[in-house]
Amino acid sequence: MCSSERRRFLKTAAAGLAFSGSRAVGAAQTAKTLPTVPLGKYRVSRLIAGANPINGFGHSTRRMDQLMVNYFTLERTVEYVLHCEEEGITTWQTSYNPKVDQALRIARDRGSKIQIIILAADTPNAPFDKIVAMKPIGVCHHGSQTDSLMRAGKLDKIHDYVKRVKDAGLLAGVSTHNPDNVARIEDSAWANDFYMTCFYNVTRPGEEIRAKLGDEFLGEPFLMDDPKRMTARVRQVKKTCLGFKILAAGRLCRDKNSVERAFAFAYANIKPGDAAIVGLFPIFNDEVQEDCEFARKYAVTAG
């Protein structure tokens, strides 16, 4: 990046930071609504707030990860949750970490009623007792872990986690990037309540990519027809599916029209009882408001 481009970027970024910081946390706003769908005994908005930007998972470059983490201070994370609720989002999907835990406590102290779905697996950095203490409505087995265990033939480890979540009285989900994994679980008749289904199979092993393309990617593979493959599987499943990465981790955010087309495709191709998860990064503009407007426009008539 040349010096003039860097100056323009920093100026724009500073403006975005000033915009976000100017919001009064917890300020009274006119409540808006979004279409909702049932998930177990709960109802969730058809647009669910994601948390990859909050947790620094940009799925592009390490610098983007750092920018996201630096932007989402504890206070901005609280603000994000409250603003999502103002726009009609009822549910937040996130992973466990101390910042998220603390932000949730503060938001709830300020009157937040946000429902949370925790993405986790049986690993040391996702202590189950602390996850349960956050009072989620559900816990979903992490997609990358699912895909890795599936390839290794260790389906029992995933199934055992689903059972553990159910035993805790919570909705149990399984996340995956591979539509074939959804079919395998369905064939096994597990008692999971829902799926998180990635629009892009970014966990394809390198040898599979090489077999398809004769070469491998630098980073994660985002193939154009993957959303069609996953949504075709989603429509075959009776259980609720929560589609994620509908914007290809920002690759479909070239402009507002590009974002709108991605929302239109997502809601037209998942089931009417499904929802979409979108990680929002309002550093340059109010993505929360914009994406909720797209959800209000397309989620109602989907299916």
Image: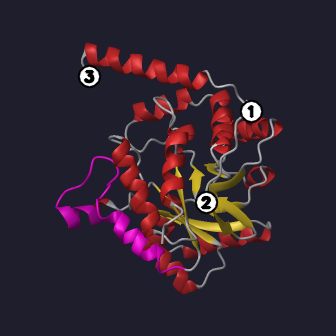
The residue where tag 1 is placed is 28
Q: Give the image location of residue 273, x and y in percent.
A: 58, 71
Q: Give the extent of the magenta segment.
A: 208-237
Residue drawn at (36%, 62%) of the image: 204
Question: What amino acid does circle 3 point to?
Answer: Met
Between marks 2 and 3, how big is the CA–CA gap?
Answer: 42 Å
Q: Nearer the viewer, residue 20 or 57?
A: 20
Q: Which of 93 and 177 is in front in this view?
A: 93
- In-image side of 112 versus 292 (left or right): right
Q: In the rendered image, which quarter is residue 212 located in?
A: bottom left
Q: In this view, does 175 lie above or below 221?
A: below
| Mark identifier at residue 105 | none
Can you give x and y, in whole percent of width and height, for residue 67 in the image? 47, 29
- Image mark for residue 1: 3
Considering the numbered disc 2 on the image, is that residue within a helix, a strand or a loop?
Answer: loop
Q: Which of marks 1 and 3 is nearer the N terminus?
A: 3
Of circles 2 and 3, which is in front? 2
What is the number of the mark on residue 35?
2
